[in-house]
Amino acid sequence: MTNKQQHILATVPIDSIAHEELGQLYPIVTAKDDARQTLLSLMPDTICLISRGMAPINGEIMDAGRSLLVITRTGAGYENIDIAAATKRGIPVVYAPLLGDAVAEATFAMILALTKRLFYWHESLITGKWDRRVRERTDDLAGKTIGIIGLGKIGREVAKRGIAFGMNIVASDPYVAQEVAKEVSAELKTVDDLLACSDVVSLHAVSTAETSGLINRSNIFKIKKGAYLVNFARGALIENLDILYDALRDGRLAGVGLDVFPDEPPKDFKHPLFTHPNFIGSPHVLASTAGAEARCYRSMCKDVISVLHGYRPKWCVNPEVFELSNLRRR
C-alpha cells in the first residue's frame, strides 16, 4: 500500500528495477542534485534513503529525516555514509557487495589493454605503422606476479582470474588470515614487499581513513621497475595523480589504468597523466555491467523491503543495530 506522505529518496537517478520493486511501497523522489541543502530539504518525509554517488550522508542528514528507517547503497562501497552516526540513531545501512565478478573482469580487461598495448597497436594499424610489429613487443602475464592490495570478495575474484592466466599471486590485507589467502593461492605480504615484487599491482582495498593515500610518493618508488598499476577500488587509495605521472615519466611504471579518481568526475583533465600514452582511464563504469547492476539493485530492494517489514536484511553494514533499543521501526 502506498503512503501518500512518506517517500523514498534517491540522491541521483536510479535503475528502473528500484522503481518497479520499491515504488509499490512508497513514491520514489529523485533529488535534483545531491547538494547538502537539497537533501536536507527532502529528508523530513523520507523513509528510505538510497545513496548513490559520494554526497556525504552524515548525522545532520539523518537527523533531518524524522521518518528515516533505512539507508542503502547499491554497491559494495559505503564510505560516504557515517556508519557510526547511523548506528547511534538506530538506522540500518544496507548495501550490495555483489560486484566481485564484474570488477574482476574489468580489472583484467584493463590489465590486458595495458600489457598488450591494445590502443597503441590499434593506432598503429589505422595510421599505417604496420612495421612497428617488427621492432616492438607486448608483455606476457603467464609467469608474472600480480600483487592484490585488498583481498576481500573482489580481491579474491581477481586472484582466481590471475591463476587462470598462469600468474603468481601475492596479496596485502591485514584483515585476511593466511588460511583465506591460501584458498586463492595468495602469499600475504606487507604493502612495501608486495610493491617490490609485483609485475602488476591491483588495488581493491576499502576506502577508509587507514587506506587513504595507501599508494603515495614515499612508497611508489619502491615498486618494481616496469610494473603496471590499476585501481578499481576508490581514488582515495592513491595520494594524487602527480605521483602516477612521475612514475610513468621515469619508467618506474610501465602503465597505469584507472577506473576511479580522487575527484569524480576529475576536476582537471589538463593534468599530464591524461595524455600520457601509457595511461588508460574509464569513468568509474567498467564494472557496471547490466548483470551486475541488476543483481545489486534486486538485492538492495529485497533488503530494504525486509527492513521496512521488520525483518533483518541479508547485507547490512551495521547488523548490531538490530540489537539496540532505539532501532527505528515502521
Image (cartoon, grey):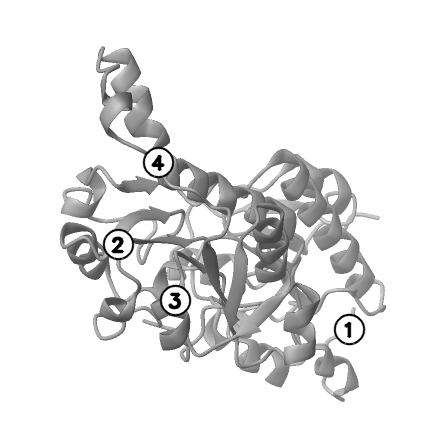
- Element under label 3? helix
- Find residue 228 and report its horizontal and vertical position in percent: 34, 52
Which kind of residue does numbered mark 2 sit on? Answer: Leu
- Element under label 1? loop
Distance in Å between CA atoms under marks 4 and 2: 15 Å
Marked residue nearer the N-terminal end (4 or 1): 4
Distance in Å between CA atoms under marks 3 and 2: 13 Å
Quickly name the residue at label 1: 329
- Find residue 91 and report its horizontal and vertical position in percent: 66, 74
Label 4: few (<14), some (14–19) or many (≥20) C-alpha neighbours in 10 Å: few
Quickly name the residue at label 2: 253
Quickly name the residue at label 3: 197
Which kind of residue does numbered mark 3 sit on? Answer: Cys
Distance in Å between CA atoms under marks 2 and 1: 53 Å
Distance in Å between CA atoms under marks 3 and 4: 20 Å
Q: Nearer the viewer, mark 4 or mark 2?
A: 4
Q: Nearer the viewer, mark 2 or mark 1?
A: 2
Q: Image point 30% across, 55% down: which residue?
A: 263
- Find residue 190 and report its horizontal and vertical position in percent: 44, 79
Q: Is residue 149 visible?
A: yes
Label 3: few (<14), some (14–19) or many (≥20) C-alpha neighbours in 10 Å: many
Which kind of residue does numbered mark 4 sit on? Answer: Thr
* Outermost bottom residue: 325
- Element under label 4? loop
Marked residue nearer the N-terminal end (3 or 4): 4
Foreground of the two, 150 or 224 = 224
Which kind of residue does numbered mark 1 sit on? Answer: Arg
Foreground of the two, 253 or 63 = 253
Quickly name the residue at label 4: 138
Q: Image point 72% across, 85% down: which residue?
A: 326
Marked residue nearer the N-terminal end (4 or 2): 4
- Measured along the vertical axis of the image, is residue 176 above or below residue 150? below
